[in-house]
Image (spheres, helix red, strand yellow):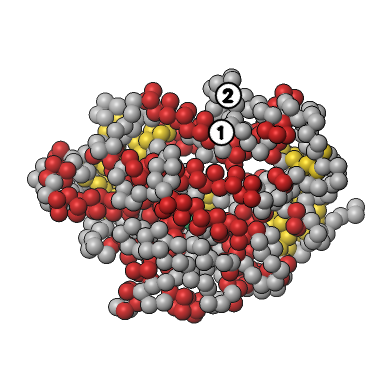
Amino acid sequence: MEAQPLQVTASYSYEETKKRPTVAVIGCGPGGMFFLHAIATRRRTMEEAGDVKGLERLPDVTVFERSSSPGGVWKTDREFKDYGTGKKKKSDCANMYEALWTNGAKENFEFFDYTFEEHFGALPTFMPRKLVLEYFMARVTRNNPNFFDNVYFDTTVVSVKYDDKLSKFIVVTRDNHSQLFASAEYDKCIWAAGENGMPKIPKAIECLLKSGSFLGKRIHSSNVGNFKEDVQGKRIILIGDAYSAEDLALQAIKLGVERIYIVSRSGLGVASYMSEWPHDKVEVISEVMPSSVIQGGHGIQFKGLEYNCELDKYEIDEDGDTINLLDISTVVYCTGYECNIRMLDEDLRKPLTNYTPYTALPSDWKMKPNMFSELYGDIVPYPSLSCRELFLEIYRYLLISNPNMMYMQQLGDSPLLEADTSSWLLLGYITGDVEIPSPEVMRKLNEKDILEMMDIHSMREKLDANYAEASDIILEDEEGKEHWSTNSLDQRILAYEKEGEKYSLRCNARDMKNSSYPVDIGSFEKLNRKGEQYLINSQVTWINRLNLQKGKHTFRDGDSSNIRSIFTDQVAVPLRKLWLDLKESDYNDLVGKGKMLDNGSRVGLPQVSPTDGMAVPGTVKGKTSESAHRGSAGHGWTVVARKERRTRNQRKLQIEKTTE
Ligand SMILES: Cc1cc2nc3c(=O)[nH]c(=O)nc-3n(C[C@H](O)[C@H](O)[C@H](O)COP(=O)(O)OP(=O)(O)OC[C@H]3O[C@@H](n4cnc5c(N)ncnc54)[C@H](O)[C@@H]3O)c2cc1C
């Protein structure tokens, strides 16, 4: 179809629109919306202050959204209408399921200009999905009646290219109604199409289940619809142990599931740390992979895995034990999401997907004194550092080689808050209020951040294979007492974990300062009282997972009396019933009497022999070199196992093992 010029409309009533940079934003989820909201907020402040020069620097923004309404993954509609054929099509994008509840403290994504208390009244810290959506929609629209005027809904961005000669982005869109294509040029482009934009389904497992004629249902977590039908009285498997698995396991228990197996490769996800599950219905099995379909299509056999450092991947341990999970009705892939970047030209897409390892760590680099210093001395880093969070070609949301390209990434622990702060930062880059360093300086600053991360236990665990291996070892003294590093509840471990979260908040604090975001949580060097409160909020929800008692309690029922709003000081109220007993009709009870209510507009692992498959300091396996654990001799601790610290509480549970 022929490309037609798209009319780019200017929303501002000022004369000098021609001087303003034009910006195309892909996506009207929270990222796109918060960017528009940042502009609206700055504009209002400037208007009030009579800052004409400032107003002239605000950009002309056009947002493209392929679905017919805003909200991104927080919406639940999984189908969109193909206006060409008039038929409903299954969407390939990820949305949340209707009954999703948040897993983190709401206080850590509260907004400075509209608090939860203003909207809902006093509220518990965890929330159902639809109330979160309601909250941020109310926040962006309440002072901005024409908020979505510059958003083209039902318009899919099909390609984005940068034309070096023109110094412009050529953005091609398709109108979902007319199916007509249009093309327009922009000075800047913001990719806000979602880090959680597309469901990630592990191909190898899907092929195995399909080719083995597994008879149960297979779904991705984002496609969970009528979950009751899939789980009530049934035995189910959740593949993956992160937040979706945690929430879906609890939802399934609520809906009367018979038994849940959470299986994962690494055993590092949040669900693997849970100290108890309601009614003992969940069994977490880590470091395993499905190996065949059994029991005439009703069961799945799993085999143990080994991590191959050389290839940076898990492989089936052919000599390992097997586990048979029988009478399985449903398999849910809680395997996360992929970035939705298909519309971007290769050059613009690569920096988001190409996890280039970092190999330039100074040869004399040493970590600051840490929990392993006493045991191993200085652990020598693996020669190349890599992790999902390392984007060497992107500096604070900017493409280093072409800073006109910007990405709404989720780098930290509070994506919604980050979407808001990064919006202010991107706006600052565009208006010139925030300096964009030279490419050389950006690379140097990225390297400085890597050094900072390498000094933080939980960050180094992700980046450095040698360090991760050392941290996966369980040590005992002569009397069989485990070393404190094995205990997730040990204050020293908690302090080390806290450092990782603190780093994420320190980065937020830095962005806030740089972009004059209207909230001060301290600086990159030191968080202030507000920043520390964020940290307390997330630590409390974490500790509540580690401290669960047997019975009906979930982490959502834990003590929340130390969780507070940094804006109002309001303490999170407890749920009025145990979370497992809460029904949808109880939500109104939960949300109290906020303003919006008045106008009605509310909306087993296979048993591993003690030293099997692990790197022992001094007798090194994989990439851990002998020198990596210098100084290990004579510390008085003996290696007893590879650390299954995240799943140890599950070992006592029964696993049906094959005797064949
Ligand atoms: C199950 C789940 C639970 C989560 N829980 C939390 C939580 O508790 N707290 C938290 O802070 N975050 C949470 N998140 C993270 C969540 O991704 C962010 O909160 C937030 O939605 C990110 O916003 P976004 O706008 O960047 O992306 P998205 O929400 O993914 O929005 C992207 C938008 O881009 C549109 N789009 C995509 N491709 C195109 C195209 N080609 N053309 C035009 N438009 C396009 C999409 O339709 C969508 O509307 C959760 C995510 C998931 C999946």
Residue denoted by label 2: 365
Secondary structure of the residue carrying tag 2 is loop
Residue 514 screen position, x and y as percent: 33, 40
Looking at the image, which is closer to me, 619 or 161?
619
The answer to whether the residues at label 1 and label 2 have Cβ atoms under 8 Å apart is yes
Pick whichever, 527 or 438, lies toward us: 527
Specify the farthest residue to the right.
660
Which residue is pictured at 76% across the width and 62% down the height? 298
Q: Position of residue 502 (x, y in %)?
A: 50, 45
Residue 41: x and y in percent read 24, 53
Disc 2 crowd, CA 10 A, few/some/many (<14, 14-19, 20+): few
Label 1: which secondary element: helix
Asked if residue 135 lies left or right of residue 15, the reply is: right
Compared with 294, 616 (above or below) is: above
Residue occupying the point 56% across, 63% down: 224
Task: Give the quarter of the image for residue 444.
Answer: top left
317, above or below 279, in the image: above
Q: Which quarter of the image is occupied by the N terminus?
A: top left
Q: Residue at x 66, y 53 (%)?
A: 489
Q: Nearer the viewer, residue 635 or 619?
A: 635
Question: Along the polypeptide, which appears first: circle 1 or circle 2?
Answer: 2
In this figure, what is the number of numbered marks?
A: 2
Residue, x 50% and y 57% (percent of image)?
A: 537
- Say the numbered circle drawn on residue 454: 1
Hey, which quadrant is residue 347 in on the image? top left
Badge 1 crowding class, 10 Å Cα cut-off, few under 14, some 14 to 19, many 20 or more, is: many
Q: Amino acid at mark 2?
A: Trp
Instruction: Say above or below: 254 vs 35.
Output: below
Q: Nearer the viewer, residue 362 or 404?
A: 362
